[in-house]
Image (cartoon, helix red, strand yellow):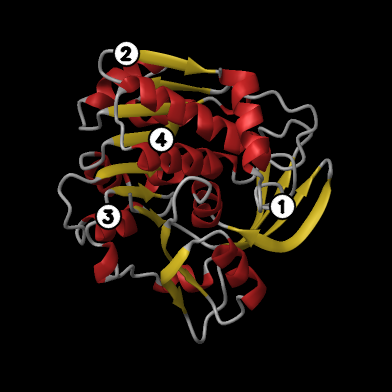
Amino acid sequence: MSLLVIGTVAFDTIETPSGRAEKILGGAATYTCITSSYFVSPNIISIVGYDFPKEHIEKFKDHNVNLLGLEHHKTEKTFFWEGRYHKDMNIRDTIDTQLNVLEFFNPIIPNQYLNSNYVMLGNVIPAVQLKVLNQLKNTSSIIAMDTMNLWIENAYEDLIKVINQVDILMINDQEIQQLQNENNIEKAVAKTFLLGPSFIIVKLGSKGSILFSKKEKYTCPAVTIKNVVDPTGAGDCFAGGFMGYLSSTKDHSFDNMKKAVSYGTVMASFCVQGFGTASILNLKEKLYLERFNENFS
């Protein structure tokens, strides 16, 4: 089944206690597309600049990512982010952000993608997410979204409009508390269900995640990784594993959602083992199935 992924493609410079990587391939849509590609052939909607190299295009092609919706800007550079992680890698500082092509990102969905069965709205400004939603024609699409505290603080009205229209909300514990001005996560989730989503996934970082429906709850532990190199993109890889598996099975029961969350967790665990996309490129099926079975079977 068709999976449409909207988000950023970027250059990242990342420093962690394990080392430093300069101007490597990153971005929410990149991580989500690569990890979902182990289950389906995803369609990407994003934008890159004139400086985006062919070698990165080939990485997408190697993973059967359909690039019809990847816009190439002729005069602006690719989105760039630089961050530095502390010894506690739950804490990071943004050193530099250069929006570049993102200032011109006006997503136009190709006709071939308008009836997508599954849609993942990556963490971009809610106004862009709304532009995508307004173009979709399949009223039975399963739509998931990710967000962040910046949009809660600076784009609240548009964010609520997006949440009103999605089936699955992915959000971390601090963000959902901030969204509802509520310290108790379960109370915050209950309030958020009133906005429209059928499922809410609360991400807990190194502690795993919790999947909520209106009647059920599943606490998914994280996969223990002894040597975390770089946590950048782990949440996007979670989204890719989750939506990739879900769209490959076409089963929206709570039990299958639990399995999808587990696959998302496995993909996130591979992500943190290397800088950027290094540990999720060209994964062998045997490897991720082994990790899934060791932790969730």
Q: Nearer the viewer, mark 3 or mark 2?
A: 3
Distance between mark 3 and mark 1 Cα atoms: 29 Å
The local crowd at label 4, few if under 14, some if 14 to 19, many if 20 or more residues have their Cα within 10 Å, is many
Distance between mark 3 and mark 2 Cα atoms: 28 Å
Q: Are marks 3 and 1 in contact (CB under 8 Å)?
A: no
Kind of residue indicated by mark 2: Glu
Q: In terms of sequence position, does the residue under pointer 2 or pointer 1 come before the other?
A: 2
Give coordinates of residue 41: x percent, y percent: 44, 56
Distance between mark 2 and mark 4 Cα atoms: 16 Å
Q: In terms of sequence position, does the residue under pointer 4 or pointer 3 come before the other?
A: 3
Residue annotated with mark 3: 116
Q: In terms of sequence position, does the residue under pointer 3 or pointer 1 come before the other?
A: 3
Residue annotated with mark 2: 216
- For the residue labelled by badge 3, is the local secondary structure a helix, a strand or a loop? loop
Classify 277 as above or below 168: below
Kind of residue indicated by mark 4: Met
Q: In terms of sequence position, does the residue under pointer 1 or pointer 4 come before the other?
A: 4
Q: In terms of sequence position, does the residue under pointer 2 or pointer 4 come before the other?
A: 4
Q: Nearer the viewer, mark 2 or mark 4?
A: 2
The local crowd at label 3, few if under 14, some if 14 to 19, many if 20 or more residues have their Cα within 10 Å, is many
69 sits left or right of 270 in the view: left
On residue 278, the disc is 1
Give coordinates of residue 231: x percent, y percent: 67, 40
Kind of residue indicated by mark 3: Ser
Give coordinates of residue 134: x percent, y percent: 19, 58
Residue annotated with mark 4: 170
Q: How many numbered dots are placed on residues in this image?
A: 4
Distance between mark 1 and mark 4 Cα atoms: 24 Å
Q: Residue at x 20, y 32 (%)?
A: 196
* Towards the viewer: 96 or 262: 262
Q: Quadrant of the C terminus?
A: top right
